[in-house]
Image: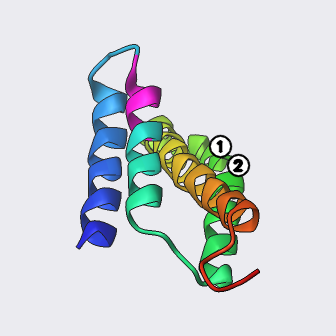
Amino acid sequence: MIDRVMPALVLVAAVLAVFVPMDYWALVLVLLGLVHGFMSRETDTVVVLMVLVAAVVLPQIADSLDAIPAVGSYLNSIIDNFAIGVAGYAVAHFVWDVWSRIMPGEGSE
């Protein structure tokens, strides 16, 4: 359930950040991504790699949307904000990976 709710919350916050001015939207988006990452640990390395690539590539893709008249800048901002939430999710996965390497599971010595 968390894997459906949190991305939707990040998307709603990303859209709100474009139209409702507030200084702390980036913090809210990163925290949502971190919460999602820590509450839903992903063990599939392909999915983790996809998240890392998305965190890097989404802002670059969003920059090309500025060429669309009238709505391009809004789409760019929404995707940039969504990428901030994805970056929080990626950081949580990185922390989980480092933690699992430092503190091996029970039974493995």
Q: Residue at 41%, 68% (x, y): give it.
A: 40
Locate residue 5: give its quadrant.
bottom left
To which quarter of the image does residue 32 belong? top left
Q: Which mark is residue 60?
A: 2
Amino acid of disc 1: Asp
Look at the numbered disc 2 and give the secondary structure of its residue.
Answer: helix
Report the magenta stretch's main SS: helix
Q: Residue 55's quadrant in the figure?
A: bottom right
Give the left or right position of residue 57, taking residue 84 as reference: right
Q: Of residues 46 and 103, which is closer to you in this image? A: 103
Magenta span covers which residues?
Answer: 24-29
Specify whether residue 25 is painted magenta. Answer: yes
Which color scheme is applied? rainbow
Q: Are marks 1 and 2 in contact (CB under 8 Å)?
A: yes
The image position of residue 54, as x and y in percent, is 63, 62
Q: Residues within 10 Å of mark 2 (few under 14, many from 20)?
A: some
In depth, the one of 95 and 85 nearer the eye is 95
Q: Which residue does the image show at 35% across and 60% down from the upper left?
A: 7
Residue position for label 1: 63
Which residue occupies 30% across, 40% down? 13
Is residue 8 highlighted in magenta?
A: no
Identity, as a three-letter code, of the amino acid under mark 2: Gln
